[in-house]
Image (cartoon, rainbow, N blue to C red):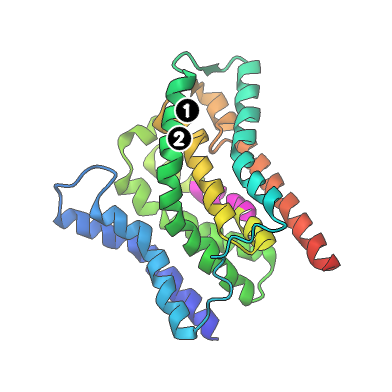
Amino acid sequence: MKTKGNVIIFIIVTLASGWIGVLVDSALPEQPEGNSLGMGLWLTMPFLISIPLRIVCRDYKDMGIKPHFKGNVKWYLSSLMIYPLVTVITVGFAMIFGCVDMSDFTITAFVSLAAFSGISGFAKNIFEEFAWRGYLTPKLMELKINDWLLYIISGLVWALWHVPYYLFFLPNQYFESLSRTGMIGTACLLMPCWAIMFAELYRLTKSVWPCVLMHAVEDAVPTVLVTTGSFMALTNHSDFWLNPTDGVITTILFTAIGLFLRSVRIKKERTA
């Protein structure tokens, strides 16, 4: 019962964090776009609330803070390769069908911006991943709910946490092909699918660090290519199917990868 109550507290504080940030920013309007105090509160509060919840219960065993490199090098390599692989596949299909414009793409500019985004994303994602995979996922596992409910709950909480981010914190450049409210709906469909990959990577390695790396690569490769760097543009129809961040084919591939990781983990547990 204590775990269930703590999970409820975590979810309530998490979903409130962004709106608290919005209120703070409304009281302090003269702040840099995309780097406000309110946005900082939104980003860090889920992780910060997990700390006292663990201290009160004296419960640190499943935080995933140890890297556990031994026997898990292939999963660390996988965390670095999943997003680039899916990006290559989807962009490759877009090029084959002639529905992508990459005239603004230059390798030097892309690598430079991707490296910067990956490094800054790594720091940001320590807070995010140690909240989702370092607290919520293991606590849902402790409640012994089935895998599908775990993916749905963690994915939807993850998506709904982003609502103030989409509505208030993100600059307009992120919404050239999709509205802010449309992004919320997309996130509610996409993030439970992503949650399969992230949860299973954590469960395979018993560490959050591969998830931090994978999330940083997502920030560095497809997000830079399509959004922050605007190195490519898809037609409206192909964007729906082949966008390397949230297209239908992309989401199917992420789901398939997550389910593959799940099958490996189940086989590993049965033979342990």
Q: Are marks 2 and 1 in contact (CB under 8 Å)?
A: yes
Principal SS element in the magenta part? helix
Q: Which residue is mark 2?
A: 115
Tally of numbered tags: 2
Q: Is residue 111 left or right of residue 153?
A: left
Q: Residue at 59% of width from left, 53% of height from top?
A: 210
Q: Along the line of sight, which residue is nearer the eye, 92 or 155?
A: 92
Element under label 2?
helix
Look at the image and give the residue range highlighted in magenta.
187-197
Q: Residue at 69% of width from left, 68% of height from top?
A: 146
Q: Residue at 38% of width from left, 42% of height from top?
A: 180
List x then y, in percent, for residue 138: 59, 70
Q: Which quarter of the rendered picture does the N terminus lie within?
A: bottom right
Q: Residues within 10 Å of mark 2 (few under 14, many from 20)?
A: some
Q: Along the line of sight, which residue is nearer the eye, 63 or 164?
A: 63
Q: Is residue 177 visible?
A: no
List x then y, in percent, for residue 228: 40, 32
Q: Which residue is mark 1?
A: 111
Amino acid tagged 1? Val
